Structure formats: structure tokens, C-alpha cells
Amino acid sequence: MMSDASNVDDLLGRAKAGYAQALAELFNRFRDRLRRMVRLRLDRRLQGRIDPSDVLQEAFIDFARRFPQYAATGGMPFYLWLRQITGQKLIDLHRHHLGAKMRDAAQEVSLYRGALPQASSVSLAAQLLGKLTSASRAAIRAETQLRVQEALNSMEALDREVLTLRHFEMLTNEETAQVLGIKKTAASNRYIRALKRLKEVLSSMPGFFDT
């Protein structure tokens, strides 16, 4: 972790000095994390129409254009700033393709000022099943996914967002608190509560934790 942080700091220093290659390397350093965020939050109605790579390409163009201003003023941790830029591109694409449909309460919940599109319970359940379950039959998998979605939907919206940020986007507790504009203790408590609720449901599913 220390080596990774040092590498990012080195790239930031070179990028601030005007090295274009360092700028590209800096973005690529976080490409996988950004791609995961986009996949989680891309509206299901746009899957097949928009590729996460297209979102990242547009985000990189904006990132390169705005980096000098960030280098001069800072203001927030680098990755959160980069995530914000990418998230705004995702919002722009949602608005362009969905228009007024974006306001559907089932698709978007405003959790905090400047919120990104909400990760749906379908996306989160699919991520969990892809990593944890060994169920191979389609009927079992479908039933399991529905139960996971129900568990996720039963959570408070903010708890579900904390779970998304911490468990799926792999933000730290401090980063999560900053993104949501809440205290670190509140972010931690909500994460523990969400994990407990999810574990209660998952543990009742035979074979879910089998490897």
C-alpha cells in the first residue's frame, strides 16, 4: 500500500511538472476502479448501448483538460476528484439517453448533493453472486439473486450507498464519509449495519458461501 501511494505521488509530481505520459499513467493507475464504479452505476436500460470504456475515454479527456487547475488548487483527494469527473460523465450520458426518465424514483435516489447514479440492487446482487456463490443451476441462481435484491432493497438508501462505496468500490471509510458528507463514525456504523443485514440473509441460503 505504501508503495502504491508513493507511485501515485510520483506520478502526480511528474504530471504537475508537465509530463503528458505521467498524466496518462496516472489515469490508467485507477482505470480498473473507475470501470467498476461505472459498471455498478450504469443504468440497466443503457447496458448494451453504452460501454464503460466510452465513459472512461470521455472522462480522461476532461481529466487532462482540468488537471492543471487541480494541480494548482487541490481541494480534495486525487482519486475522489477523478471519480467525481468520471461520475459526472456518467450522469451526462444518462441525461442524454434517458432524459426525463432519469427522474424515475425507482432508478435514482438523491442521497447527497451531487450524487452519482445509484447502483441498483440488480447490479449489486450480480456482483455478489459472481464472487461468492457456487450455485450453478439457473433456477437456483435466479431465486438467490431475487432474495439478495430484496435484502438490499430493504436497507435504508444511505446504508446501501455506504455498502456500495465500501464493499464494491473499495473506498476507505474516510473516503466514504467525505463523498457522502457524513461523519466517519456514521459511515462506519452504517457499513457495519448494512453488512450485518446482508449476512443475515445470505447465511440463510444453503450453499451460498460454499467454495
Image (cartoon, grey):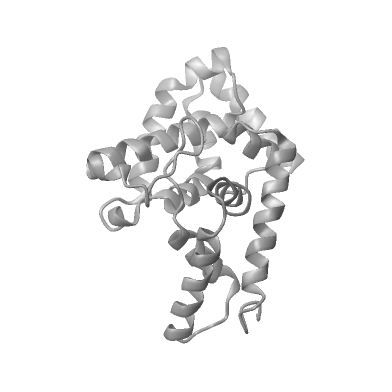
Residue 208, compared with residue 100, is above or below; it is: below
Where is residue 152 shown, x and y percent of the image? Answer: 54, 60
Where is residue 69 shown, x and y percent of the image? Answer: 49, 15
Camera-side residue of 23 and 70: 70
Where is residue 29 shown, x and y percent of the image? Answer: 55, 41
**Numbered circles on residues, count:** 0
Q: Judge left or right: residue 7 versus residue 38.
A: right
Camera-side residue of 19 and 108: 108
Camera-side residue of 30 and 22: 30
Residue 53, compared with residue 21, is above or below; it is: below
Residue at 53 percent of width and 68 percent of height:
148
Residue at 72 percent of width and 45 percent of height:
188
Q: Judge left or right: residue 193 versus residue 62.
A: right
Residue at 60 percent of width and 26 percent of height:
12
Q: Quadrant of the C terminus?
A: bottom right
Where is residue 42 shown, x and y percent of the image? Answer: 38, 50
Residue at 39 percent of width and 28 percent of height:
62
Residue placed furthest toward the top: 72
Residue 162, compared with residue 18, is above or below; it is: below
Q: Quadrant of the N terminus?
A: top right
Camera-side residue of 143 and 54: 143
